[in-house]
């Protein structure tokens, strides 16, 4: 019974926001997206290579298809893992922790570029 009450409490709280909240959250999100755009087009490793040298824009990273099997890694991976593989291998850089603001920015930019595209996990 307690879990039901807790669930009801959370569902009631989920809708408690204003138009101003939505505008502020959208502005904060777009700030992170723009940081990701800048990172995507900047060298993230030691060899001065950037993500856009393989992917001219983030849309062709197809974030909507993750998780999926990646031949380079030999198993099913998340988008986070694939981004780190790219940073470590083609870019010759250090992987980013999951909670690194740079990772959040990159993932935000990549998914924003594909907004409106249906999810298709596992698709190649």
Image: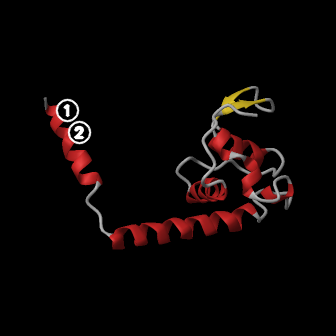
Q: CA distance from mark 2 to mark 1?
A: 6 Å
Relative side of 2 to 14, left or right: left
The front one of 21 and 90 is 21
Q: Which residue is mark 1?
A: 3
Q: Are marks 2 and 1 in contact (CB under 8 Å)?
A: yes
Count of numbered tags: 2
Element carrying mark 2 = helix
Q: Is residue 50 visible?
A: no
Q: Is residue 13 visible?
A: yes
Q: Quadrant of the C terminus?
A: top right
Relative vertical location of residue 47 with respect to residue 5 in this rendering, above or below: below
Relative side of 50 to 12, left or right: right
Instruction: Write down the quadrant of residue 19 in the picture.
Output: bottom left
Element carrying mark 1 = helix
Q: Which residue is mark 2?
A: 7
Image coords of residue 12 (percent x, y): 22, 50
Q: Quadrant of the N terminus?
A: top left
Image coords of residue 85 (percent x, y): 74, 42
* Residue furthest top in the image: 75
């Amino acid at each position: 019974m307690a879990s039901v009450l807790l669930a009801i409490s959370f569902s009631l709280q989920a809708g408690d926001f204003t138009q101003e909240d939505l505008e502020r959250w959208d502005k904060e999100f777009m700030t992170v997206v723009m940081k990701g755009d800048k990172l995507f087009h900047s060298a993230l490793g030691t060899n001065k290579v950037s993500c856009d040298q393989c992917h001219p824009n983030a849309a062709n990273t197809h974030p909507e298809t993750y998780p999926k099997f990646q031949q380079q890694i030999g198993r099913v991976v998340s988008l986070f893992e694939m981004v780190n593989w790219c940073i470590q291998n083609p870019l010759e850089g250090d992987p980013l922790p999951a909670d690194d603001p740079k990772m959040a920015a990159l993932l935000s930019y990549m998914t924003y570029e594909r907004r409106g595209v249906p999810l298709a996990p596992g698709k190649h």
